[in-house]
Amino acid sequence: MQTIMGVLITHNHVDHIRGLQVLVRKNSIPVFTSAKIWESILTPYVKISRDCIREIPLQQKFHVAGFDIEAFPVSHDAPETIGFHICQGEKKITVATDLGHICDTAAPYMKESNLLVIESNYDELMLENGKYPYYLKTRIKSDNGHLSNHQTSAFLADIINENLNHICLAHLSKNNNTPEIALSTFYNTLSERGIQLTGNHHISVLKRNMPTDMIRLDE
Ligand SMILES: [Zn+2]
Ligand SMILES: [Zn+2]
């Protein structure tokens, strides 16, 4: 725990803040998110010590542990949702995990990355044929919901370049997706567009409940 220099929070949905209170209660780690997101997190049920609260502006650099970080807004159905663009020297990482569509504000951060962690939330057919109630299916598919495998793959096919070496498909739905389908949708989309990956492109799917292995950006 002593090696954690800060926690970045994207929005107030429970799958993103469930462990926050317990994590910072014992360890007094600084937690970074926007004023509006703090407002939505801090309720009578969720109390975070003042010492841990760091308010950050959107689209302005702040500095943590030797990284220059910028938060940018994404479209999702929380009071506010953000992604993070994290830079050190020439290397750039973008993380965007909950977004219904990729807006003009978010796209440039993703295009510029060497490592992109992007949501590939659901397979359209699995969602359509699955057990979720109609309102939830509509919410997920909306512009403020989540990205489907096809939406993510089409966007990646648009932006892929030789500097974008690592693509991590993330935030896969447990019920409406599988790693195999997410990956095959991505590879099929690239081959339909005639795009060939090189040995410098590393594509992976992040696991739902396990830490990701270390990724080295100089490899
Ligand atoms: Zn969410
Ligand atoms: Zn989420």
Image: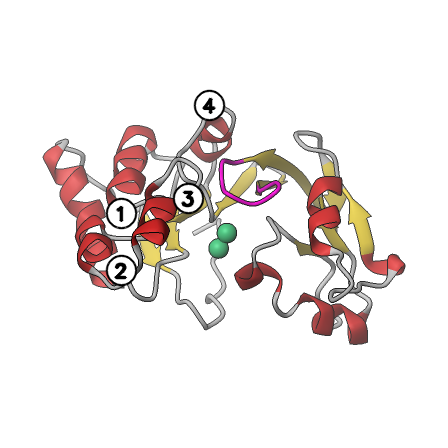
Report how far apart the C-alphas of labels 3 and 4 lie in the structure: 17 Å
Is 79 in the magenta? yes
- Please give the name of the residue rendered at 49% of the width and 63% of the height, measured from the top-left corner: 214
Residue 111 spot, x, y in % from top left: 43, 31
Residue 213 spot, x, y in % from top left: 46, 67
Amino acid at pointer 3? Gly
- Please give the name of the residue rendered at 39% of the width and 67% of the height, measured from the top-left corner: 207
User: Magenta region, mostly helix, strand or loop?
Assistant: loop
Image label count = 4
Residue 131 spot, x, y in % from top left: 25, 64
Q: Of the residues under marks 3 and 2, which one precedes in the sequence?
A: 3
Q: Is residue 136 above or below residue 107?
A: below
Residue denoted by label 2: 177
Q: Is residue 31 visible?
A: yes
Circle 3 packing at 10 Å, graded few (<14), some (14-19), many (20+), is many
The residue range painted magenta reads 74-81
Q: Is residue 171 above or below residue 144?
A: below
Residue denoted by label 1: 149
Report how far apart the C-alphas of labels 3 and 2 lie in the structure: 15 Å
Q: Quadrant of residue 127?
A: bottom left
Q: Is residue 181 above or below residue 199?
A: below
Report how far apart the C-alphas of labels 3 and 1 lie in the structure: 13 Å
Residue 67 spot, x, y in % from top left: 68, 45
Disc assigned to residue 104:
4
Q: Of the residues under marks 4 and 2, which one precedes in the sequence?
A: 4
